[in-house]
Structures are given as C-alpha cells and as structure tokens.
Image (cartoon, helix red, strand yellow):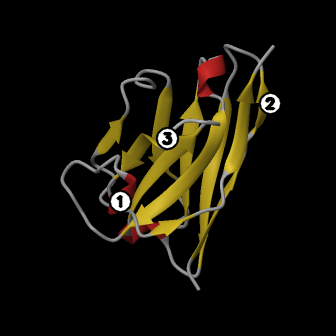
Amino acid sequence: QLQLVESGGGLVQPGGSLRLSCTASGFTLDTYTIGWFRQAPGKEREGVACINRSAFSTNSADSVKGRFTISRGNAKNTVYLQMNSLKPEDTAVYYCAAARKWNLICALRGSEYDYWGQGTQVTVSS
C-alpha cells in the first residue's frame, strides 16, 4: 500500500527554521511529482511548493518564495521542505502529496495529486 508520512513539524519562534520530511513506503518518490501543501484553521488548503520527478523544476507560492526550499534527498523515498525565516502566518498543518502526472512546471493545485500524507503541525509563535 502506498503511504506518505510527514515529519519534522513543531513549535518554532518567528524567524526560526524547520525542515519537514516526506517519506514514502510502498513506493519510491523519484517517479512522482511531489508537492507540499498547508492548511490553517478556517482557511482553504494552499499549495506551498512542488518538485517534478526529474527534479529539474520546482515551483513555489509567492508567500514562501525566498524562504522555503523543496528538494529531493539522496534516498529515493524522501523529499524535504526547508523552511527559513518562519512567520506566524506560516502556522498550519503541512501535508505532502504525490502525483503520477508530470508537467514541465509542477502544479500547486491539490487536485493534481493522487496520494496524501496525514500531515504534520507547524506552529510559529513566540
């Protein structure tokens, strides 16, 4: 069974950093486009960043450009989201997702993704 598991969330002060990990079981992530999404209480789910399966192309939301970086690990079943200069408005549950479909520029629309993890909480607060 295909499963995605997120880890690395937690409580961090504004300006701090966290690295989230998305790990797969039952398949390897190198043949999928991987996206990170987040959902804050009372808000719609938002696409944060994605990386296509060639890893040559990434895409990110304007709200996180210059602060968040998505990358693939050396192991074929891990993708990371490095989050720097965190702000209180980054507080949300973060999800990773995998898509079979390939686009030259990966999509930040949740409807493009086939598999989802359970999420990890990120709280940015002093």
Residue drawn at the location 27% of the way across and 68% of the way down: 101
Q: Is residue 108 visible?
A: yes
Whole-percent x, y for residue 34 in the image: 43, 57
Whole-percent x, y for residue 112 in the image: 32, 61
Name which residue type carries label 1. Answer: Ser
Label for residue 111? Answer: 1
Specify whether 27 is left or right of 20.
left
Label for residue 11? Answer: 2
- Quarter of the image with the C terminus in it: top right
Name which residue type carries label 3. Answer: Glu
Q: Nearer the viewer, residue 50 or 44?
A: 44
- Quarter of the image with the N terminus in it: bottom right
Residue drawn at the location 76% of the way across and 17% of the way down: 13
Alpha carbons under labels 3 and 2: distance apart? 22 Å
Whole-percent x, y for residue 85 in the image: 60, 17
Q: Earlier in the sequence, mark 1 or mark 3?
A: 3
Specify whether 29 is left or right of 38.
left
Q: Nearer the viewer, residue 22 or 96?
A: 96
Alpha carbons under labels 1 and 3: distance apart? 13 Å
Name which residue type carries label 2. Answer: Leu
Front: mark 1 or 3: 3
Q: Earlier in the sequence, mark 3 or mark 2?
A: 2
The residue where tag 3 is placed is 44
**Would you say the residues marked 2 and 1 are in contact, meaning their CB atoms lie under 8 Å apart?**
no
